Amino acid sequence: MQSNSQDIRRAILAKWHETLSKHGNLFSSDSISGTSPPSVFVGSYNYPKVFVGPMIPPVHGDTSLLDSPERWGGKSLEDIVNFRLNLVRGIQKVSIEQTEGKYIENLQEVAMSSKPIDTDLTFEKPTSANISLDGESAPFGPVGIINSAKFSGSTSEKSIEKTFYDKDLKAQDAVLNLYNSGIEISKIQKCFSIGMLGQKRKLVPTKWSITATDDIISKSLVDEILDFGIIDSYRVFFFEHLGNVFTVILFPHRWIYEMIEAWYSNGILGFGSDYEDARGIDHPPAIAGAYFAAKLGVLEYLIKNQIQSGVIILREIRPEYAIPVGVWQVREGIRTAMKQNPIISDSLDNALTTASNKMSISKSEWLSHGNISKLLRQKTMSDYF
């Protein structure tokens, strides 16, 4: 299994080197001219002074697909990794408290833009096109320290602009306003990250802003579904993409949610899980941002159908998922799963059997690494009111 993952990484890396042999001068230069999707990135290294900047491919035109996870359904792992590698990341070191000034304000305009933005950067020294695919961290293209930056052609998204200028609005209310206005989650996360939301604004590392945005929205959706009637059936949903297999089980119960993940490491199966009831979760989940991303995806289904249920999500991460590409794929995977026709079961036990049969891990293994059986034995309905 390990060699399988390594083979996939080698094949993707070989494809990247093939690209460099044809266009390497575009990725190893002291300047770049291209159209940002639009995209900005805030690093976490050296916090609270972090590396911040735009991401740009060395081409002009409609590049929006390169940083729009909501549009990546059906794309292969190689496609998505190449989207990431083709974005050159310009950086400057900035304090997280610095949310004003020309450079940051330009980046805020980038994040606010409704369309790709023409961008010209010069760097202190030529960028290096050497990248590594280690299977542990998400891939990045070349990085360069910015000497100068020029942006042109931005068009502000009106709802984002309005929220940006409302400095009396709390950050969580700003996130919900944008979500309820139909702004894509990936775009809300960028605005959050580049210090555009809330009363006491600061830059937030991109990976933190992604989890915070999913958490804020999913908490709000839980508050809504608690007023809905409880489903009267056991429904199993299934979806597989990018080497990830998801099954979602809805069962008659007031809101209770558990996600269990399984993965292969050196041929050994590892597990992680976490759970909550109607009171929410009071600690960082053991499975990190995937917990909130999946929760949001299933809650959108409950909101749309105006129902409440108990939820179990099983995620099997197979060796084919050789390069992690971000928790967006969990959110989008669950969203897609919830659009499939469910299999109806007559009991939770049978629903779990159906779900497990879609995967290479047995029902007993899943249950032994989760808490849902214990929770259902211990709690009565009155515990949730």
Image: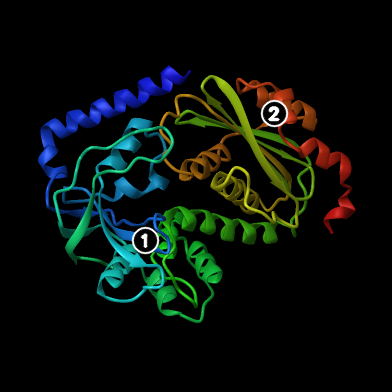
Work out whether residue 37 or residue 375 is closer to the camera in this orientation and state it: 375
Q: Quadrant of residue 81?
A: top left
Q: In the structure shown, which secondary structural element does the residue marked by tag 1 occupy?
A: strand
- Are the residues flagged by discs 2 and 1 in contact, CB closer than 8 Å? no
From this view, report whether residue 328 is shown above or below residue 243.
below
| Cα–Cα span, label 2 and label 1 | 40 Å
Extreme-front residue of the structure: 46
136 over 185 or under it: above or below: above
Query: Which one is in front, 49 or 32?
Result: 49
Q: Secondary structure at mark 2?
A: helix
Instruction: State the quadrant of the C terminus.
Output: bottom right
- Circle 2: is it few (<14), some (14-19), or many (20+) Cα within 10 Å? some
Left or right of 9? Residue 210 is right
Residue at the image point whose x is 53% and y is 58% from the top? 212
Residue on which disc 1 sits: 50
Rendered location of residue 357, percent (x, y):
65, 21
Q: Tell me what residue is drawn at x 44 percent, y 62 percent.
A: 204
Q: Amino acid at mark 2?
A: Trp
Q: Residue furthest toward the bottom?
A: 168
Tell me if residue 113 can be seen. Answer: no
Q: Position of residue 336 (x, y in %)?
A: 52, 39
**Location of mark 2 (residue):** 366
Q: Amino acid at mark 1?
A: Val
Q: Residue at x 70, y 35 (%)?
A: 235
Q: Quadrant of residue 361?
A: top right
Disc 1 crowd, CA 10 A, few/some/many (<14, 14-19, 20+):
many
Q: Which mark identifies residue 285?
A: none
Asked if 177 appears above or below 130 in the picture, the reply is below
